[in-house]
Amino acid sequence: MKKFLKTLIPFDIAKGLSITGTYFAKVFLTANRAKVKQHVVSEYPEVPAPLEPRFRGRVQLILDEAGDPKCVCCNACAKACPTGVITIEGGKKEGRKTRIPTRWDYEMERCVFCGFCVEACSFDAIKLNSQFELAAYDREDFSLGLTGAHNVLEPSPVGKFSYSDEA
Amino acid sequence: MPTISLTQSLVISLIQCVLVVVFIFVVVPLTVFAERKVLGYLQQRLGSTRIAGHLGGLTGLLNRGMWKLGKVPVLSYWRGLPGLVGDVMKMLLKEDILPTKADKFVFWIAPALSFVASVVVFATICFVPGTFFTFPTWVPFLGGLPVSGGIADVNVGLLWILGMATVGVYGIVLAGWASNSKYPLLGGLRSAAQMVSYEVPLTLSLLAPVLISGSLKFSEMSQAMAVGVPLWAIIPQVIGFLIYLTCGFAETNRVPFDMPEAENELVAGFHTEYSGMKFGFFYLAEYVNMTVVSAMAAGFFLGGSWLLPFGLQGVVNPYLASLPSWLVTLLCEPHAAFFAIKIVFLLFVFIWVRGTIPRYRYDQIMAVAWKYLIPLTLVNLVLAAAVRLAM
């Protein structure tokens, strides 16, 4: 009898309609407001896509107070890297106790963005930043070094549309 | 009351036809647009917001500055609207492909049949009982003449509507058969079976208003159901409304009953082989059919051109009689605007249901019709008869 009544009176349909109706009302009333956002799919190229703090983007070196990379050229990251995209050569600098990289090459075209290099680093010298729009027309553009417009010390000039709350 | 010559009455009928066609062709494209937006909102998306490219096109032109300022454009709700123009242009300009083995004549006639059958139904639908408006005296030839709220509010209006709705099925079946291809044929035959099943509860659910109002004329039925019934008539009205709406979804081939065009099983169903404007006619016919079903549901169950649904208007009217006269005119008198608003709301319900309920399996559809809806309508008919007896 209970089952019969449940079939006869469309409770489940009403429940579903109320859920979608609530979504409709919420999104309809806030669609024009950038701050109070109820829709989960945003207008991506115009509105930057928010990313989670743990998002694994491109490899980037972390700098110390003096503006030099924290990297001490221990090669732990290069050994941990499953695809071998990191090549480091160390040198010396006046007034710095540890070594400083003179060459820090990163071949992004082979990188799998696994984050093992960050886990291997005991000096907190590497991070994976929040950039994912890294497409380029030339293979040379994926070879990043310490110098040049597209380098490992700062975010890539491409990829303007993504951001993360964690710097 | 001035006497009307034959020419004058013909011209007035023509004007009514134009008005109805304008109504249809304003509501239908807006429904197509609203379908995208409302479906988006129901699923926490934004629906269509641009026509093409990054910031190109007309909408881009309107909104580029606001995006530069870092703001979401004010025109947000309407940003996808120019896409409609693109749709229409695509339909008109696309190549019209005729399959080699198709039956040419039937292939051509099927979309026209489908479309005409759905539009013609509007002849007997009465937007407001009595006079819609009177021409001012300065209008040449037609000055001082009244224009009634329906084109041809004939005494057997309901019969006309149901008969014409059946002809619409014919268009779908013929399209499926004439394409000479297996998926359209399967879609068309499924459609035939589904429509045959659902026409029974649909008609039975409409018998309750016929029984209560004692008429087949659209305006009389609408009036009787809105203001001429006692309070307890609300029970058969609500049940009948729900059943009618369910059958209406099935008759218009909408989700959750879109068996004839189940995409994941039948490519696109009966219109798989159609392209260009022939497909456009099927597309239009679907939306015109939705409008027809909404208009009938609004007229028979939601109080037609009166404010309150389910016959509550007749109960409330005596209490409202002491209000100021302009409020009485607004709340107690019939207006075409109320009817139009109800149609638009029901069209929203169509989209709402589409965004909520997944498609039924084929045997489930048949079970719903024969095992649940028909017995329910019969019970509802008994209730309506009881109301009629007590009135």
Image (tube, coloured by chain):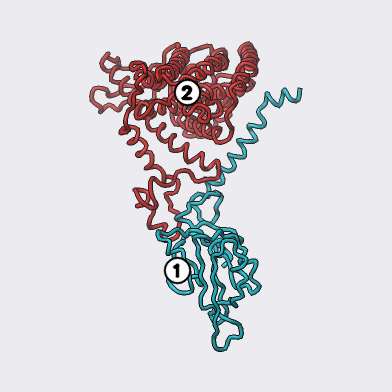
Q: Is residue B65 left or right of residue B248?
A: left
Disc 2 marks a residue whose amino acid type is Tyr
Is label 1 on the same chain as label 2? no
Q: Residue at x 42, y 49 (%)?
A: B75
Disc 1 marks a residue whose amino acid type is His
Chain to which the residue tagged by mark 2 belongs? B
Work out how far the residue at label 1 is from the one at label 2, CA to CA, in angstroms: 54 Å
Question: Disc 2 marks which residue?
Answer: B183
**Which element is circle 1 on?**
loop
Q: Residue at x 38, y 58 (%)?
A: B65
| Colour that chain B carries in the picture | red
Who is closer to the viewer here, A12 or B108?
Answer: B108
Specify the chain shown as cyan.
A
Q: x%, y% of residue B2?
A: 30, 17
**Which element is circle 2 on?**
helix
Q: Residue at x 55, y 31 (%)?
A: B322
